[in-house]
Image: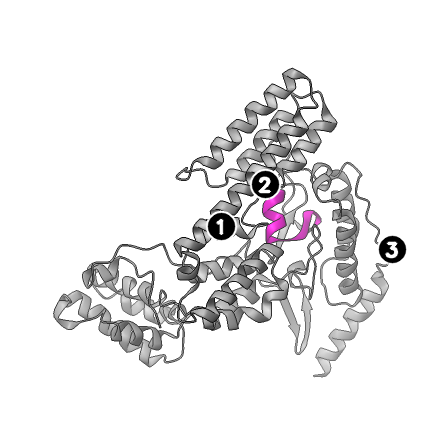
Amino acid sequence: MKITAINNYNQYYRNKTEQRPLFLYQQINKPPSDTISFKRKKVITDLRQIPNITCACCGDETIPNPTIDKLFHDEMFYPANEAIDILKKAGYFKKKSMTKSEATAFQFCETYSKLYKGLYVKDIFEKDSIRELIRYYDAETRENIARIESMMTKVYKNSEHMVKVLEPYEHIMHKAQKEVFEFLKQESQKTPEKNFTEILNNPRVKEDNLKKLEEKQALIFSDMENIASEMSPQSYKTVLRHIRKAKIIFDKPNSKISNKRQLVITMFKDLEADIPENDIMLKILSKVYELPSSRNDANSFIIKYADNNPNEIADKLLRGAAATIEHVKPRNRKNDNGKNDISNYIVLCGNCNSERNQIPYSEFIKFHPDMPQNIQKYLDRVIKFINKGILIGYDKYPQQIRRAVEDESDKKINLIFNTLNIIEAEKNRNSKKRCSEDL
């Protein structure tokens, strides 16, 4: 197996450049404890844990974050004893080149990795007993233990293994991520020993995807210019000036701007109030939203994440479909913060949640015309689990969320909850309690 992305510690042994930080179980708004069990009768207290719950925006099926986390924990990382053996065989811990402190740290890590054979690095080194033992060492040795621990988590599995692990979840991936995964599968068949980073970081792959991405951006900007030509001369000049600014933003390869697309969208949204030709401006905004991003375009995904480590790339393939809590009225909207409770919660996939940002639903649905019916589909699923007595604490939720969505969309989205049956829900809950008492 290849070993990549080792941190500074291996510079004691080899002259390697420092790689990107370790992927550390990225979690989109990590949920609290979300299930309660009456013996073997499980109930749900978190909307994201409803089986096959769909995104209220795009309507696609979501996957719970804990499912993704468990997949990575169980399949993407080596058990600690295997990871340290691989590093040792690769020549990273030679006694002649180690200081006394480094040797002590290595012996500690190796001993407890073997003692807890089969457990993963995180599971061992987060044990209270292990942390307590580490505290007895001097500062230098503690630092070396931490570095070896980090190295052990950076022993990445090859693309052949990663493809097998991710394949059962391919159907849940969004379109762009699915395209990237298909590409990774094809390349893995040719070079199964390579990892995802090595495949995407191929100069030919990066060059090809960058060219295609730039062509897509250029075509959209050209369409925007054509649409703007229908405006008055003054408005036309203003829009062209903003298009030139947008091109400059995208043309800066080393820019510190983290989300260029969002900056461009905000720039044109702010311009909307200054342009009297509302209908034409709406068409331009619609085009702006078509600009490729790593969420909706495979070429953009590859360019953005090619340098990331293999586990981060795999995480990005799945995390866009993760079930996340969205605040219907945004929590950080200036002078109008939404509540942080279930009356303001709705489930969106990670991609739609990121895209929505603080845009009012009344505006957002212009670019997501299927959203009204998808929210209804989502609510129907929620009501089904309330009625079954499985979803606990949400009896008032359908009415509350109807009001919240109606307000945020300026009454453009009207939800129906006439299938809600609280009597049936209470009956089913009582039945579950009686079953638990009989067990």
Which one is earlier in the sequence, the residue at label 3 or at label 2? 2
Pointer 1: what residue? 209
Q: Nearer the viewer, residue 64 or 213?
A: 213
Pointer 3: what residue? 418
Q: Quadrant of the N terminus?
A: bottom left
Within 10 Å of disc 1 (Cα), the crowding (few <14, some 14-19, many 20+) is some
Q: Nearer the viewer, residue 435 or 261?
A: 261
**Residue extent of the magenta highlight:** 343-357
Seen in the picture, residue 404 relative to 422 is either above or below; the reply is: above
Residue 29 placed where, x, y %?
A: 55, 53
- Residue 196 falls inside the magenta stretch: no
Q: Amino acid at mark 1?
A: Asn
Q: Amino acid at mark 3?
A: Asn
Identify the residue shown where x is 58% and y is 33%.
266
Residue 343 placed where, x, y %?
A: 71, 48
Q: Is residue 430 left or right of residue 154?
A: right
Identify the residue shown where x is 69% and y is 40%.
364
- Residue 353 falls inside the magenta stretch: yes
Res 31 visible: no
